[in-house]
């Protein structure tokens, strides 16, 4: 299994500003994932972040809006840029895919970052 | 796009009763997973059922899978107030995403004492 922490746990931000969310894992993992959960909705994959390469973004998400860093095998950041109220969501990171002691299919999630944009 | 579709969207029962949630999906799968989310926090993996399995048990959880109907159900027996949470089914998005998950819309379960 893997234990994941996220910072901050929640934040209230003004529109037009940016917020960087940190995700720390207690073991080395190749793949990390970032999801968005809009209010009352399910989770949607933003991007897959591999160490040493550019993140792979899903349709509807772009690097300029959600830049991701993956400097090592235990850490990643997601930045929500130029925020608007529509970005108010819970942002979650997860690990899995069979690396770092995780099973190939099961994923472990961080506690999430609850973002409110005014 | 969301592959899994759960129903009901919301379910309210009393402690001791059983709760059944259903999930449908669209494409072929290797496995289907169920996750629980408490109060908008992180998700917890509950159970995984492979495509060649029809039923699986884990404690008070029972999962069924019907690949011909592309559907799965999650049964929680003898529910407790602590089971109050949102429940999501999930399938692997595609191999290009490194086994990221595609989640259904979820069922919000309320168990009252």
Image: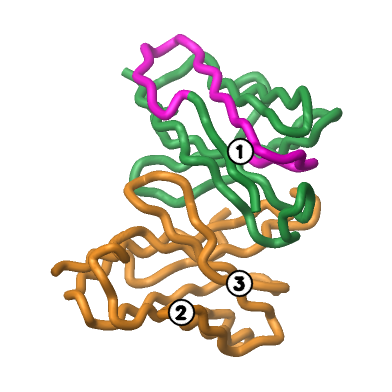
Q: Nearer the viewer, residue B88 or B43?
A: B43
Q: Which mark is residue B59?
A: 2
* SS category of the residue bearing label 3: strand
Give the x, y percent position of residue A97.
74, 53
Q: Which residue is mark 1?
A: A34
What range of the chain is rendered magenta? A8-33
Same chain for marks 2 and 3?
Answer: yes
Contact, mark 2 vs mark 3 (Cβ under 8 Å): no
Residue on which disc 3 sits: B48
Which of discs 1 and 3 lies nearer the camera? The answer is 3
Question: Is mark 2 in CB contact (under 8 Å) with mark 1?
Answer: no
* Chain ID for orange: B
Please provide percent x and percent y for residue A17.
46, 10
Compute the Cα span from label 1 to label 3.
Answer: 21 Å
Answer with the quarter of the image where residue B113 lies: bottom left
Which comes sooner in the sequence, label 2 or label 3? Answer: 3
Chain green in the figure, letter: A
Dot 2, how many residues are within 10 Å of its Cα: few (below 14), some (14-19), or many (20+)?
few
For mark 1, give the secondary structure.
Answer: strand
x, y (%) of residue B90? 56, 63
Q: Is residue A68 above or below residue B70?
A: above
Residue B21 in percent (x, y) is at: 38, 75
| Image position of A33 (left or right of B18) | right
Q: Chain of mark 1?
A: A
B6 left or right of B14 in image: right
**Chain of the residue under the numbered disc 3 shown in the image:** B
């Amino acid at each position: 299994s893997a234990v994941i922490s996220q910072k901050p746990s929640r934040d209230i931000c003004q529109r037009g500003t940016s917020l960087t969310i940190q995700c720390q894992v207690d073991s080395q993992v190749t793949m990390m994932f970032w999801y968005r959960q809009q209010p009352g909705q399910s989770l949607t994959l933003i991007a897959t972040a591999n160490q040493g390469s550019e993140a792979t973004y899903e349709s509807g998400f772009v690097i300029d809006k959600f830049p991701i860093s993956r400097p090592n095998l235990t850490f990643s950041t997601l930045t929500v840029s130029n925020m608007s109220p529509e970005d108010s969501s819970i942002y979650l990171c997860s690990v899995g895919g069979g690396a770092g002691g995780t099973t190939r299919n099961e994923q472990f999630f961080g506690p999430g970052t609850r973002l409110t944009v005014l | 796009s969301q592959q899994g579709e759960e129903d009901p969207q919301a379910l309210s029962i009393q402690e001791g009763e059983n709760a059944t949630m259903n999930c449908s999906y669209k494409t072929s799968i290797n496995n289907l997973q169920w996750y629980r989310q408490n109060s908008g926090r992180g998700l917890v993996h509950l159970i995984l059922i492979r495509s060649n399995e029809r039923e699986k048990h884990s404690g008070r959880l029972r999962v069924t899978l019907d690949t011909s109907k592309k559907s799965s159900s999650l049964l929680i027996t003898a529910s407790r107030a602590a089971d109050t949470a949102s429940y999501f089914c999930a399938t692997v998005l595609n191999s290009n995403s490194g086994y990221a998950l595609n989640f259904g819309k979820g069922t919000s379960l309320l168990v009252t004492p």
